[in-house]
Every structure is written in structure tokens, then in C-alpha cells.
Amino acid sequence: MGRRNRELPLLEQVEILDAGAEGMAVAKVDGLVVFVPYVVPGDVVDIQLRKKKKNYAEGRAVRLHRPSPLRVEPACPHFGVCGGCKWQTMKYEAQLEAKQRQVRDNLERLGGVDCSHMNPICGSDNIYYYRNKLEFTFSNRMWHTEASERTDDEWGALGFHIPQMFDKVLPIEHCALQAEPSNAIRLAVRDYAVAHGLEPYDIRNHTGFLRNLVLRCTTEGRWMVIVIVAADDRQRLFPLLDMLRDTFPQISSLQYVVNSKMNDSYADQEVVTYYGDDHIEEVMAGYRGSRDLRFIVNPKSFYQTNAPQAQRLYSFVADYADLKPTDTLYDLYTGTGTIALFLASQAAKVVGIEYVEEAIADARVNAERNGVGNAVFYAGDMAKVLTPEFIAANGQPDVVVTDPPRAGMHEHVVQQLLETAPRKIVYVSCNPATQARDLHLLASRYDVGRIQSVDMFPHTQHVENVVELLLAR
């Protein structure tokens, strides 16, 4: 324990009161709000403070005196160290209640929204092994736990970054987020690398060979594996890829990236297909009996990481949109066009807008592959694209679906929606706070109708929320 921490007090036998922001839990001691990770409301714990400000403090539970009735055993052996899935020790029903409360508090407090008619949150059928994408990091700096021993000849680690430590990686033996053969693939890559002397990357000194391992899968059991290396050394890379191809028949797309940059982002790097297809394909059932949709998922594509819940989320959006066959629909922040294409069979015309040009290229491909002829897609900054001239050229929207990033909608976009005045707006958000802010701005012309939260990410604080906005008469 560092000198600074020794000067901060130990708070004894403190009851945890609630689940809070960023996956932290909340306690109060003599009027001081204390944020603590990896504990459950109702736990009674000793808290070692690690940071103390005037109005709040942060600490860590060092002893559990009395467990909460909401507490359960975590499924992950790395719980409390890797930094993810912070609510894994909380009963899932309590997680859902906390998420719904988070949404309601934000909408009421920041948006002035009446949430008395809010629908119950839609939980996920699968609370483990639900993700279709994981990205692991190689590092020559292994994070050691109390149970692990440091050796002079240790190879390094393949796993997840330790929070707030860019160069430290926790070796993952079993992750409960993605179905098999995810763990088997990762362990096979690690064992091969150790046996053949393939060095993990040193992010400080920019040496080493192996950088990242990306695993993507579909609900039909097809897998994409991307190995990212620091140098184009095919004599060392290709045998590793051969091993993966020969060992795991589930892999239908095996790819690699040579990334010699100083950072791990590969968005601007070439992806080379070594074996199989250059994509995998996800299937989504059509809305209300319309035909199924098949979405191309490329190495750089965005696709909702909990596919079954994405189906439910989009169905709520479609229900709230309640489109007529003669309607023109605008889908703002359309991404790869999944919502737009899901709704296209219900409308006369769909117009999708997205900032990322590669995503719009994917949307156009997906539209063509699915035979959707009434959808058009535009790339550009939403605040600059959505103008009166654009609307005049593409038609007055009867309904607008908007699914902005966490920062919410730009004020110019909000103003344009107020001026355009579609009869209905369906607002999808992954951040209830910025959604509440935008709802407050839209309240001058729109009344809030139905509200539906959807849990896309069990064991985390993240939640999606759908709000129906009706043009006031």
C-alpha cells in the first residue's frame, strides 16, 4: 500500500446502499458519498479509501462482514481483477431494477419526463456467453494477482487490459462473455506463441510481434478470427494461422493485420484474408413476418454485440415507429443500416445518414444483398447533412428514428428536427443522461409516449433505452 493510501482512513462495517454510475456501488458515511466497486447493495463491508474529495470518496472493499441477499457467486474466475462485468455478483433481477432506476432517474431529473407509464425493462435471456465480439491484447507485461507467481522467464500475457494501466494485461484463462470455442481459440494461440517464441508486444518500447486477437461469431456458429501483428513476418505468422485453420473448423474467416503504428487501432489498416471469406454473415428475423435479413459483418463493421437482444431492441423501435406503407422514414446515425433495413419493408422510403463512410458502404451492400430497393444512405456529419435542402431533395420525413452516440444529438440536429416536425420520433440511446437532455430540448413540440429499456449487456451498468415522441397537436 502506497504512502498516500496509508494516510486515508479505513471505514469499518459500512452498508452498501445502491448501485451507482460506472458500475460502482454507493455508500454514505457521515454525509460523505463513497463509491466502491465489486460490491452489492446490502453488503456490509470494510472500505479502504483510496481517494477523498470534499463531497465524495472512492475506496475498495477489503472485508465482507455480511453478504447481501442480492449477492451471488460470479461465474468468471477473473472477477474483480479484469475490470469488466462489475455487477456479476448481483442477482440479475436486481441488475435490471438498477438499470431501470438509472434510466428513470435520468429522464425525470434531467429531462423532466413523466416516467409513471414506463414499461418494465426487457432482460436478456442469456446473461453469460452473449457477446459476438471480443478483442484481446498481447503484452510482455503480465498483471500478477495474489494467486499468481512471478517468474524470470515468463512469456507475457494474452487477455484484457487492467483498468487505467495501458501496458498491463491480465492473462485470461476463461472468459464467460463469449461462447466456445472462444476460450479454446485464445488459449491455443497463447500456447502456440509460447512454444514457438512469438513475442508479445511491448507497448512502451514498441518491440515484439503479437499485438491483438479479435474473435467474432454469429448466431449460426460461424467464426471470424483476426490476428494483429507488428511486422510483416510471414514465416512466423503463417504457421500460426495454419494451426488455427486446421484446429478449428468453425473458423470461416481467418484474417490478419500488420499494424506497425504506435497505437492498437486498426481502423486505418489493411485487413488481409488468409483463409475463407473476408466476412461473416449474421441473420436477423424480419419484423412481423417479413423475410429474414442477412447482414455482412466485416472485420471493421459495427454490429450489436448481443444479437438476440438487438432483435428485440429493433422490434421495439419498429413497434413505436408504427409506420404506414406510404411513410418516409429517416434513420439518423444509421451505422451499417441495420435499423433502417429492418424497418424498410414497413415504409415507402427509408433515408439513412451516418458519419462513418465505411459503415455507409456496408449499409449499401446489405441493402443490395437483401433486395431492399427503397433505402438510400448518405455519409457525412449529421449536423451538416440534415439541412432543409437535404430534406427537400429526399422528402419530408413522416417518422424519424435516431440512435446517436453516447454524446447524444448535436444541437443543430435537434433544432432541425423541431423545424421539420415529423409526426413521430423514436429515440434510441445508450446514454440515458444525454437522451434526457435532448428530450428536454424536444419538449417544446413533442410529448413523450412509450418508454422501453433493453438490457444489452448483463453484469454491466450499460443500458439501451427507447422513447417514443409524439408531435403535439
Image: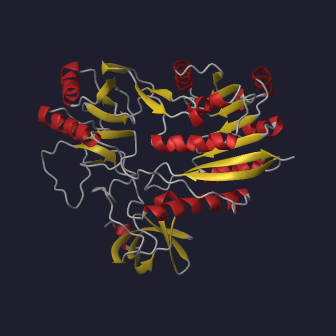
The image quadrant of residue 270 is: top left
The number of numbered discs placed on residues in the rendered structure image is 0
Q: As displayed, is residue 69 above or below residue 454? A: below
In the visual, does 2 lie left or right of 390? left
In the visual, does 461 lie left or right of 394? left
Q: As displayed, is residue 142 above or below residue 206? A: below
Residue 378 percent across, percent down from the top left: 64, 23
Q: Give 170 or 275, whichever is nearer the viewer.
A: 275
Q: Give 45 or 188, whichever is nearer the viewer.
A: 188
Judge whether residue 353 can be spotted in this image: yes
Judge whether residue 229 can be spotted in this image: no
Q: As displayed, is residue 390 above or below residue 94? A: above
Residue 189 percent across, percent down from the top left: 22, 35
Residue at image position (50%, 54%) is 123
In which quadrant will I find the N terminus?
bottom left
Residue at image position (41%, 29%) is 266
Residue at image position (31%, 35%) is 213
Residue 445 percent across, percent down from the top left: 82, 46
Q: Residue most toward the right?
A: 473
